[in-house]
Image (spheres, rainbow, N blue to C red):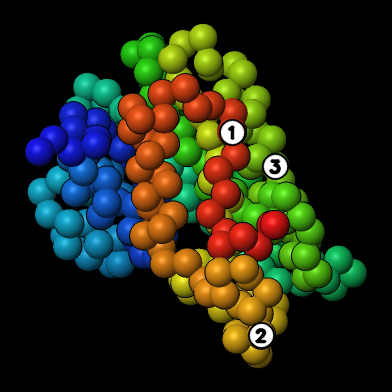
């Protein structure tokens, strides 16, 4: 039975563990050639090896434009095309507005926001030239609402939501689709950093209608849909996977 991504080539950032690793595993299982990119080299190499021949790991600092361009050029040279980019890399740093320092704020913006822009910039010419492609930007429910202690993270995720729409408008005529995914609480290491979760996780999760955190695979299946031809008329849209928390 053919896979949902047969013949496609996908680049996933932040793929060494957690949500990105789950996406890479699922994409490969559905027939894609997958390039896992991260700065956690040991974890990334291990994740790619566990997937097998359909996957390779490459070091990538998403704030480095030259590194982005070099990696995309390598992928195109090896495979002749690039069909999907999942801008998954991101960090969370907690801090109230009056307490967070500029260095921390800028670090979050550099990775979560500028890294996404550089990724789109790096793949844009190739996808426009081949007149096809799907860019999937991982935002958050924090891209819809603010939360105490999350000034930098929230700013970055609102920005990802907006940049997604700009790219969708600019690239739609070339057959390139750009959408954002907005996860709620996902059972990964980042969840432990969210204010209130570690102190009382049960109380935190009771506020979610489905009363639990999601498994990373539940986000991966949504990314799979957006990378596949099944979502061929979806662009500039927000896809929420949050257990009803925004309701």
- Numbered badge on residue 178: none
Tell me if residue 208 can be seen. Answer: yes
Question: In terms of sequence position, does the residue under pointer 3 or pointer 1 come before the other?
Answer: 3
**Percent position of residue 39, x then y:** 40, 58
How far is mark 3 from mark 1, CA to CA? 14 Å
**Percent position of residue 56, x then y:** 21, 48
The total number of labels drawn is: 3
Q: Disc 2 vs disc 1: Cβ atoms closer than 8 Å?
A: no
Q: Is residue 4 above or below residue 15?
A: above
**Which element carries disc 2, helix, strand or loop?**
helix
Relative to residue 23, is residue 1 drawn left or right? left
Question: In terms of sequence position, does the residue under pointer 2 or pointer 1 come before the other?
Answer: 2
**Percent position of residue 18, x then y:** 40, 65
Reading the image, the residue beneath label 1 is 237
Q: Which residue is depicted at the point 47% across and 38% down?
A: 136
**Quarter of the rendering occupied by the C terminus:** bottom right
Q: 191 or 212, which lies in front? A: 212
Reading the image, the residue beneath label 3 is 159
**Which element carries disc 3, helix, strand or loop?**
helix
Q: 182 or 153, which lies in front? A: 182
How far is mark 2 from mark 1, CA to CA? 31 Å
Task: Farthest residue to the right: give it.
Answer: 98
Question: In terms of sequence position, does the residue under pointer 2 or pointer 3 come before the other?
Answer: 3
Reading the image, the residue beneath label 2 is 203
Tell me if residue 107 can be seen. Answer: no
Q: 41 or 22, which lies in front? A: 22
Q: Disc 2 vs disc 3: Cβ atoms closer than 8 Å?
A: no
């Amino acid at each position: 039975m053919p896979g949902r991504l047969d013949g496609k080539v996908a680049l996933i950032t932040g793929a060494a563990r957690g949500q990105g690793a789950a996406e890479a595993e699922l994409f490969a299982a559905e027939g894609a050639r997958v390039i896992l990119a991260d700065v956690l080299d040991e974890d990334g190499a291990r994740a790619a090896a566990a997937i097998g021949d359909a996957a390779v790991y490459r070091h990538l600092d998403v704030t480095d434009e030259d590194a982005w361009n070099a990696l995309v050029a390598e992928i195109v040279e090896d495979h002749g095309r690039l069909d999907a980019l999942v801008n998954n890399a991101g960090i969370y740093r907690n801090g109230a507005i009056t307490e967070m320092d500029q260095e921390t704020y800028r670090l979050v913006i550099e990775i979560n926001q500028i890294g996404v822009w550089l990724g789109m910039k790096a793949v844009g010419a190739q996808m426009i030239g081949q007149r096809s492609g799907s860019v999937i930007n991982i935002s958050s429910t924090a891209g819809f609402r603010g939360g105490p202690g999350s000034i930098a993270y929230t700013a970055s995720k609102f920005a990802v939501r907006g940049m997604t729409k700009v790219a969708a408008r600019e690239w739609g005529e070339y057959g390139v689709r750009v959408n954002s995914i907005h996860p709620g609480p996902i059972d990964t290491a980042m969840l432990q950093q969210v204010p209130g979760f570690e102190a009382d996780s049960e109380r935190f999760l009771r506020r979610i209608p489905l009363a639990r955190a999601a498994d990373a695979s539940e986000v991966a299946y949504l990314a799979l849909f957006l990378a596949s031809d099944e979502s061929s008329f979806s662009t500039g849209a927000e896809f929420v996977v949050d257990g009803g928390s925004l309701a």
